[in-house]
Image: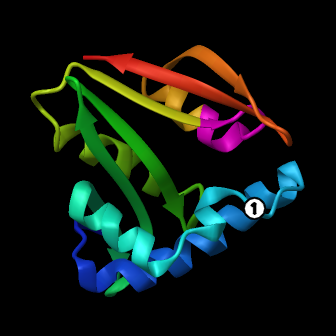
């Protein structure tokens, strides 16, 4: 597996993978209107213009991705994904370590996930993230986590 910075040419493939990866979350919360599922190609292209987007590839096929940006001295990480057939192989952990390494000047990282999303919560806790707040939505609760370097 090779992790590199994604380019706008990867946007459509990452978007398709994102929709596949978030289908399980939609089932978990019975909410098929989650933003990662409704994001358009135009919207993800805007993300590429504003964020660092990493991809994990095996034999030139994208099997994972994550994106992040900085604001007010903090790094906001989002959309960590791995292909369902490739989960539990360390892709998420490696992507998280790489995205943190891409923002060496930052001392605080923040992200969120669903309150019942055990796999992502496990990865984030293993990497040193701690919960600091929750936000109630109609279908579920978002758990916000942070990590200080």
Residue occupying the point 39% across, 41% down: 77
Any part of residue 62 in sight: no
Measured from the top left, where is residue 46 in percent x and y?
A: 32, 67
Tell me if residue 115 is in the magenta stretch: yes
Q: Is residue 16 above or below residue 136?
A: below
Of the 4 image quadrants, the one containing the C terminus is top left
Where 100 falls versus 95 (above or below)?
above
**Dividing the picture into quarters, in which one does residue 44 lie?**
bottom left
Q: Is residue 127 magenta?
A: no
| Tag 1 residue | 33
Where is residue 73, by image quadrant? top left
**Horizontal arrangement in the rendering, residue 36 relative to residue 57 (left or right):** right
Find residue 48 and report its horizontal and vertical position in percent.
Answer: 28, 66
Task: Report the residue at 25% width, 79% height from top.
Answer: 8
Q: Position of residue 131 (x, y in %)?
A: 57, 16
- The colour scheme of the drawn protein is rainbow
| Numbered range of the magenta stretch | 113-121
Q: In front here: 108 or 123?
A: 108
Numbered label tally: 1
Looking at the rendering, which quadrant does residue 13 occupy?
bottom left
């Amino acid at each position: 597996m090779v992790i590199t910075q994604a380019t706008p040419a990867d946007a459509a493939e990452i978007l398709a993978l994102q929709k596949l990866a978030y289908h399980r979350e939609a089932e978990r919360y019975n909410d098929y209107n989650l933003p990662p599922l409704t994001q358009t190609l135009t919207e993800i292209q805007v993300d590429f213009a504003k964020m660092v987007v990493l991809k994990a590839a095996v034999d030139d096929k994208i099997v994972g991705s994550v994106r992040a940006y900085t604001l007010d001295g903090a790094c906001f990480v989002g959309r960590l994904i791995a292909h369902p057939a490739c989960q539990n192989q360390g892709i998420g952990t490696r992507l998280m370590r790489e995205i943190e390494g891409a923002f060496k000047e930052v001392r605080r990282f923040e992200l969120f996930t669903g309150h019942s999303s055990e796999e992502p919560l496990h990865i984030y806790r293993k990497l040193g993230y701690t919960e600091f707040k929750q936000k109630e939505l109609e279908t579920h609760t978002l758990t916000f986590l942070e990590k200080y370097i």
